[in-house]
Image (cartoon, coloured by chain):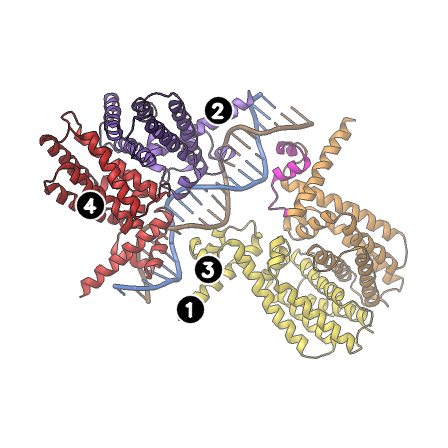
Chain colours: A yellow, B orange, C red, D purple, E brown, F blue
Amino acid sequence: MVSDRVADRRRELLDAAIVVFARKGFHASRVGDIAEEAGVAHGLLYHYFRSKDEVLETIVRETWQLLQADTERIEASGQPLDEQLRRFARMYLGSWLSSPDLIRVLVREVGRSPQLGARVGEIRGVFVALRRMIEAARERGEVRADCNAQLAAWIFYGALEEILTAWVLGQLAGGERDVERAVKTVVDVAGAGLAA
Amino acid sequence: MVSDRVADRRRELLDAAIVVFARKGFHASRVGDIAEEAGVAHGLLYHYFRSKDEVLETIVRETWQLLQADTERIEASGQPLDEQLRRFARMYLGSWLSSPDLIRVLVREVGRSPQLGARVGEIRGVFVALRRMIEAARERGEVRADCNAQLAAWIFYGALEEILTAWVLGQLAGGERDVERAVKTVVDVAGAGLAA
Amino acid sequence: MVSDRVADRRRELLDAAIVVFARKGFHASRVGDIAEEAGVAHGLLYHYFRSKDEVLETIVRETWQLLQADTERIEASGQPLDEQLRRFARMYLGSWLSSPDLIRVLVREVGRSPQLGARVGEIRGVFVALRRMIEAARERGEVRADCNAQLAAWIFYGALEEILTAWVLGQLAGGERDVERAVKTVVDVAGAGLAA
Amino acid sequence: MVSDRVADRRRELLDAAIVVFARKGFHASRVGDIAEEAGVAHGLLYHYFRSKDEVLETIVRETWQLLQADTERIEASGQPLDEQLRRFARMYLGSWLSSPDLIRVLVREVGRSPQLGARVGEIRGVFVALRRMIEAARERGEVRADCNAQLAAWIFYGALEEILTAWVLGQLAGGERDVERAVKTVVDVAGAGLAA
DNA sequence: GATGAATGAGATTTCATTCAT
DNA sequence: AATGAATGAAATCTCATTCAT
């Protein structure tokens, strides 16, 4: 199918961009590098994206859309909060094992440019879902009544992101066992900290 | 004193750079913007710094040196861990009120760039001091014995940085009261999570 | 008939090109714009024309061929010079009312580009015919003996073209009445100026 | 003086641009060609002009400002119309001998781009002065009462420009004697055509 | 120390043209 | 005939850095 070919090419370019951005950083990556990685002429990138910026924006947006969907699925499960947080942490930190390049790009480039933060509204969606999880747990009595759910969501998310950052920067060991341990530690700390 | 005048000019340029980087981001900031903000010709910047990169690097390094010194002072106080963490959080989050532009620059540019992370060795110093704090508390029996101090240091630091990020991005209210509340919340959560 | 369909497509593309060139100018017009205006894919243009340049060249050449034929018909009429000039002026200026886009293209793109002027030999044909008209009238005694017919032909043509330019640029009103008035004025002036 | 050096460099770049535009046309001229002709690096052009377009625009505007000033001086002389027209024609056509490259550029590029015609408002100034000359002469009784001064101004100017065009395109001989002859012819024709 | 003209490497982006389908 | 994905040459413009004054 033609539309499949088109979609494939687009995906190939996005995947190539993830590899290249991870290797050199967004600013040091030239459009030609992406095209070369994808095995096409650089001009073709402009059939699928308006600019190099839009490529990064697309990567970020699509990733966060998936993350948001997964988060909302966890939220909908109605499990106890610590189980939900564990699943979220396992999913988020686990992506370091399955897609390290993507994580490298997200950790390094997101929030870097002012526009990116502003335009990628999807990022908020994840925080909103996390906050609702905590609020629901508070209403069920699993969490202290005086807990600020929004702040707690940021704290929890920040802990995870910093662990990813440490892995990206090579400051902490990031093997398979380390991921499991990190999930346990962060959930233990947060769980105890939030518990009623 | 001549050397004071020199020091002043250097400081003026650094302060101007902080303002400009905070406003537009490092990459979008031109050397001419910094000079204009400082009220000098752009060529002069090269009397004080080897390059635009060195300007950012200097800002980051000097800030982290101060932070490291403060952190080691807290560590040396021998207070209980929760008090030490409170002081660290108050100092770190409090800088949002006293130097928001500086925080903006640090949040956006640091920890992301691999070169920057590598070159600014001082960043590690703070983490090392935090880890030692937690380890010492563990030995005093204030913290669970199975706690991974290094991971805990990253988690605690990550929580703080994400709060700063939320303030920088305007996603959380960052007024004076909010800072106090954030300090309390993050210390409560971490304290309970780490407690023996 | 197939060849008619072919001719139609070709015409459609030429007409679309006239509209687009008139709107944006030749250089700012993309091949895709022409195709879009014609409602076909841009690749199809290359079945009918070798290049974008050839499209413009074709428009110009075909127009001047018609103009040359009309001019020679006027020349062959044997009427007095002032009547011949009036018919020429009416035909040339009158095309502003019937084909303003075409006039826009001709005024803006032709006679300027050296390549175009060189390749489209038909342009000379009109000047040659005009010159012969004036020479013939001189021999009939209608025109001063010392008149340089070639120069006079350029002057007369230049007066007409500048009027078109003024209309194209919106510097002179170019309604139906204005066209009639312009024909009268230019013929009066030229007629008196050339008269024996 | 520094400001003289600056002014000189600017002039050098404009003069180089005139030479290059005359040789290859505006669109075929690269910014690097202009810089090379001026003997400087291409980046320097952007210290003096915002873009390549602005270079052309500046050339056109400055030329027309001079032409307008000269025209208004002629208008102020109070001489008979035919003498005024002769001086204008001599000045305008004479510039073909003194600045053929400039004329080439003006003839080929002006009116080509829609923006240029719109932005260079100075062009109107010359026409306004010509029109006023003719109107004043009409009031003095030198010109037929039914003459449309504005149209006549365009006709007269168009005749001159077409002669320049013919010279630029090499369709008419454009030596020193030819210029004198053209002045005489065009003034004779216009003079007789307008005379009361 | 201070200036800002000058340099030039380098990157993005455009778009006419080709050609497999 | 018709499509539009793919190519890649080419050109403008930016801006960090240098250096003569």
Amino acid type, residue under disc 4 in the picture: Leu
Provide the residue designation for mark 4: C67
Q: Nearer the viewer, mark 2 or mark 3?
A: 2
Q: Which residues are magenta?
A: B24-46
How far is the residue under mark 3 from the one under mark 1? 13 Å
Provide the residue designation for mark 1: A3
Above or below — where is C152 with respect to A138?
above
Q: Residue D135's mark?
A: none
How far is the residue under mark 4 from the one under mark 1? 49 Å
Q: Position of residue D98 (x, y in %)?
A: 33, 23
Above or below — where is B67 with respect to A1?
above
User: Label 2's element?
Assistant: helix
Q: Position of residue A177 (x, y in %)?
A: 68, 68
Pointer 2 chain: D
Q: Residue A48's mark?
A: 3
In the image, is D33 to the left or to the right of A18? left
How dense is the environment of label 2, judged by Cα within 10 Å: few (below 14), some, or many (20 and up)?
few
Provide the residue designation for mark 2: D8
Q: Position of residue C30 (x, y in %)?
A: 37, 52
